[in-house]
Amino acid sequence: QVQLVESGGGSVQAGGSLRLSCVASGVTASTYCMAWFRQAPGKEREGVAMLHAHNGYTDYPDSVKGRFTISRDNAKNTLYLQMNSLEPEDTAMYYCAAAANYQCTTYAARWRAWAYNDWGQGTQVTVSS
């Protein structure tokens, strides 16, 4: 089973940057996707970055494209999310996720929480105006 531990959250002013980290253990060839999701109070969990574990393909929704970058360091078993030009609307709990289901590679499912079966505990990001 995949275990995920996030860190790096905090408080920052609008326009600032943060880098989140997710140390992953138990990731095998059966893991198809790694992703970052976020959830603000009263809102659904939404995907903000996705990485195909086999070929390194990355994708982002329009809301963060050009500002967020997902990457990985295989030697450190760590997934990163670099967040630049942060906005108050980016305030949320951020979660690292892994999927052992090929569906996560499809456009219809990659931003859906149900497509991911392993989750970290989350790290809070707060952006003030």
Image: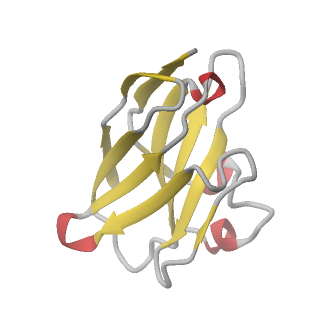
Which residue is farthest left? 75
> In which quadrant of the rendered view does residue 14 lie?
top right
**Residue 79's spot in the image, x, y percent?**
35, 58
Check the picture and name the quadrant holding the N terminus: bottom left
123, 101: nearer the viewer: 123
Q: Position of residue 9 (x, y in %)?
A: 36, 30
Instruction: Find residue 97 and report its horizontal and vertical position in percent.
Output: 48, 51
Q: Is residue 21 left or right of 50 when viewed as pictured? A: left
In depth, the one of 118 and 40 nearer the eye is 40
- The reply to whether residue 8 is visible in this rendering is yes
Q: Residue at x 45, y 32 (%)?
A: 16
Q: How is the image coloured?
A: secondary structure
27 to 117, vertically: above or below: below
Look at 56% across and 77% down and name the residue there: 57
Q: Residue at x 58, y 49 (%)?
A: 67
On screen, residue 66 versus residue 7, left or right, reads right
Return the residue found at the far bottom: 55
Residue 1 visible in the current orientation = no
Q: Can you tell which quarter of the image residue 104 is in?
A: bottom right
Q: Which quadrant of the rendered structure holds the C terminus? A: top right
Compared to residue 94, the image places residue 26 above or below, namely below
Q: Is residue 95 above or below residue 40?
A: below
Label total for image: 0
Q: Quadrant of residue 26?
A: bottom left
Depth check: 10 or 86 in front?
A: 86
Outermost right residue: 108
Residue sticking out furthest to the front:
15
Q: Position of residue 46 (x, y in %)?
A: 67, 40
Between 108 and 13, which is closer to the camera in this rendering? 13
